[in-house]
Amino acid sequence: MLRTIEEITVQGTRSLTEVVDRSHSIPIVDVSLGYGVCTAGLDLATTTGVAELDKLIHDAALAACKEIGRQYPDSTPTDEVCAEREADKAMVKVRKAAAAASKGAPK
């Protein structure tokens, strides 16, 4: 039986720093926000299904990173860098699931 993933959690993470004085800053916290991306109805054995999931993941990553940036405007990295890094992490799971789905797909 082929095991499929039903949801992938995409998590945006940004760092905040607290300025103690003009010559020192101390990292104080990483802030994360995660969104679930549903894979229901997507055929990961096809390039179309993987491409659609890739878009959903990138959209979720950007939304998470933008929300953190809105709440914590001095956090780093930028929305775009944060989103790309987090989407890349989530796509590792997608590639594994796509490979498994392709092996189990009828020829």
Image: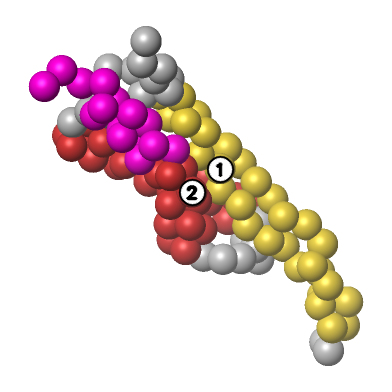
Q: Which SS type dominates the magenta stretch?
A: helix
> Which residue, given by chain and number where applicable, does mark 2 sit on?
89
Disc 1 and disc 2 in contact, CB within 8 angstroms: yes
Q: Type of residue at label 1? A: Gln
Q: Type of residue at label 2? A: Lys
Numbered disc 1: secondary structure: strand
**Residue shown at the point (27%, 17%) measured from the top left:** 41
Q: Position of residue 55 (x, y in %)?
A: 30, 41
Q: In the image, is residue 63 above or below residue 40? A: below
**Residue shown at the point (50%, 39%) measured from the top left:** 10
Q: Is residue 89 left or right of residue 46?
A: right
Q: Position of residue 91 (x, y in %)?
A: 40, 44
Q: Is residue 83 visible?
A: no
For this rendering, which residue is in front, 50 or 23?
50
> Which residue, given by chain and number where applicable, does mark 1 sit on?
11
Considering every residue shown, the one lying at the far top of the view is 1
> Quick check: is 63 in the magenta stretch?
no
